[in-house]
Amino acid sequence: MKFVKILRLFLYLSIFGATIFIFSCSDSISPENDQGQIKITLVDGPGDFDQVNIVVTRVEVHKSGSDSSSGWFVINNNVATYNLLSLRNGASAVLGNNSLDAGNYTQIRLIIGTGSNIVINGDVYSLDVPGGAESGVKLNHAFDIETGLVYELMLDFDAEHSIIQTGSGQYKLKPVIRLVPAVISGTISGRINQTNALAAINTIIGIDTVRTFADPTSGSFMLMALIQGTYNVKVFPTNELYRDTTILNIAVVAKQNTDLGTISLRLK
């Protein structure tokens, strides 16, 4: 009888302990039921530099209804250096990919670390980022995180207009960045037949110019983060042997690529 009582007590405690474990696990995962996901991708247009290297130590987003010092949520705290000029013609880098509580958010903040620099004709110059390590680079962009869904956002960094020369060998970063949700954007690609034309390709979105250079070996190019709509694409050869070319009324569909095929340039 004593053995039976001990066995019953053991079974009771086992069931009780399992019940506590189940409830504690349920409490720990319940916030995820009210979460969505954010994915931020960095792309760039060309600039007149060899490299533009930005050190990002942390990426945060700010939830609406909070004051300026609170309500920041970290979505990436892995230190990484991004050469902006390598992020073009289809190349990109993921700045952050993480879960977030469902709700409305109003800002994105990039905390910039020491060591950012630019390379010009092989020479390395330190890049000053005012407030980058303290207040960070703040980008105003309102978006909603919905339960169970992924919000994808592209940051199109305009390196050419973001770098300011302040003195001899002194450069400052004043970021010029377009923020475009992936759900409403697409791309335009193609190939310049004459690779020696070293062509620049651009189009206009409102007051912004989106530009890239054709690959000097293959002639291929891609204009990225274009809001769905109709565009005129202009090709400007840097080789003066060739004429400029404009291709009219190119339709861009969200989340799709419009391939222009091979473009042959005319001699002057």
Image (cartoon, helix red, strand yellow):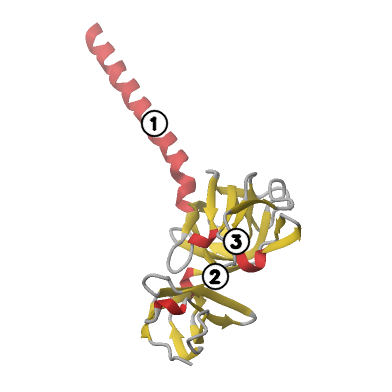
Residue 45's quadrant in the figure? bottom right
Residue 21 placement (x, y as % from top left)? 39, 31
Q: Is residue 186 visible?
A: yes
Residue 176 placement (x, y as % from top left)? 65, 66
Numbered disc in front, either 1 or 2: 2
Mark 1 or mark 2, earlier in chain:
1
* Helix, strand or loop for disc 1: helix
Marks 1,2: beta carbons within 8 A: no
- Write the residue at 49% across / 81% down: 228
Residue 188 placement (x, y as % from top left)? 43, 78
* Helix, strand or loop for disc 2: strand
Disc marking residue 104: 3
Q: Amino acid at mark 3?
A: Asn
Residue 165's quadrant in the figure? bottom right
Residue hosting label 2 = 180
- Write the residue at 58% across / 81% down: 205
Numbered disc in front, either 1 or 3: 3
* Neighbours of disc 2 within 10 Å: few (<14), some (14-19), many (20+): many
Disc marking residue 21: 1
